Amino acid sequence: MLMMRNILMSLLAVMAISPAVATEVIEKRMAEVVPTVSPDSIQPTAMAGIFEVRYGTDIFYVSEDGRFLLQGSLIDLESRQNLTEKAKRSVRAEIFAEIPDAELTVYTPEGRIRHTLNVFTDPQCPFCRQMHDDMEKYLEAGIQVRYFMYPVLGRQSPEIMRDVWCADSRTDAMDRAKAGLAVASRDCPTPAEEHLTLGREMGITGTPASVTSDGQLISGFRPVVEMLMMLESQ
């Protein structure tokens, strides 16, 4: 009996793959499948034998032996928590925390900043203008609004965004653009391509699209009261 137990224990030890070995196996397998890009991270999940493999904000699940790949949401049925969305929010939060205000058009409240919204916006987007109309309410509530360039709705949008970013006062120029007024033509280097690439990586297809400081993605226009409630519930 003791010998049989020892044999079973040895078999289990062989069958169990350590996280370090599994990571190496998965990394090698993914290099065969996606040879041009390396994963940003490979780590165990709460599900035994399944690892999370992340490329930017894209998340996949791979078996520890590197044979099976799943794409979709991993849900913890006990906590009713979407573990995939939780991981994506963490990644988004890290990305936006590293982007300096100097690269953006930023509206900052006079008092304490209670929340921050990172907003992908287009100067000719009607719902973006509607959101901008509530700027004073956001500032009064202690919410900082950081605008990213996302000129995707009209042929003139890229030029208007360039003029806003190159203006002496970006906020004044943005106010004019959002009101449908002309902005003085200026030319300078802008982060337009970087912002567009970031938005596409986030899966943003329309404006406005907002990302909170903790990484929650909020698509489309929301009344300011609803947005404030969402921020306060974080």
Image: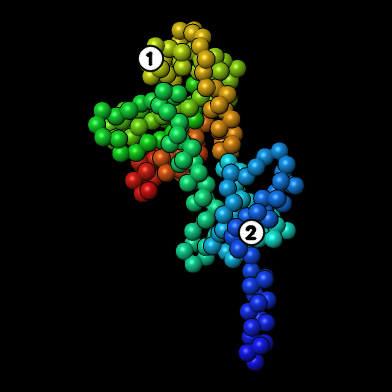
Separation of residues labelled 2 and 1 (CA atoms): 54 Å
Q: State the SS at label 1.
A: loop
Confirm or deny contact between disc 2 and disc 1 (CB under 8 A). no
Q: Which residue is mark 2?
A: 21
- The residue shown at (49%, 37%) is 95
Residue 1 can be seen in this image? yes
How packed mark 2 is, by other alpha carbons closer than 10 Å (few <14, some 14-19, many 20 or more), is few
Viewer-nearest residue: 191 or 234: 191
Is 23 above or below relative to 5? above
Q: Is residue 127 left or right of residue 65?
A: left
Q: Position of residue 7 (x, y in %)?
A: 67, 82
Q: Quadrant of residue 141?
A: top left
Is 184 above or below relative to 47? above
Q: Position of residue 207 (x, y in %)?
A: 52, 31
- The residue shown at (67%, 71%) is 14
Q: Which residue is mark 1?
A: 169
Q: Quadrant of residue 104?
A: top left
Is 118 above or below relative to 9? above
- The residue shown at (64%, 65%) is 17
Q: State the SS at label 2.
A: helix
- Quadrant showing the N terminus: bottom right
The amino acid type found where label 2 is placed reads: Val
How packed mark 1 is, by other alpha carbons closer than 10 Å (few <14, some 14-19, many 20 or more), is few
**In the image, which disc is placed on residue 139?**
none
Viewer-nearest residue: 163 or 190: 190
Q: Position of residue 163 (x, y in %)?
A: 48, 13
Q: How many marks?
A: 2
- The residue shown at (26%, 28%) is 110
Residue 180 can be seen in this image? no
Viewer-nearest residue: 109 or 152: 109
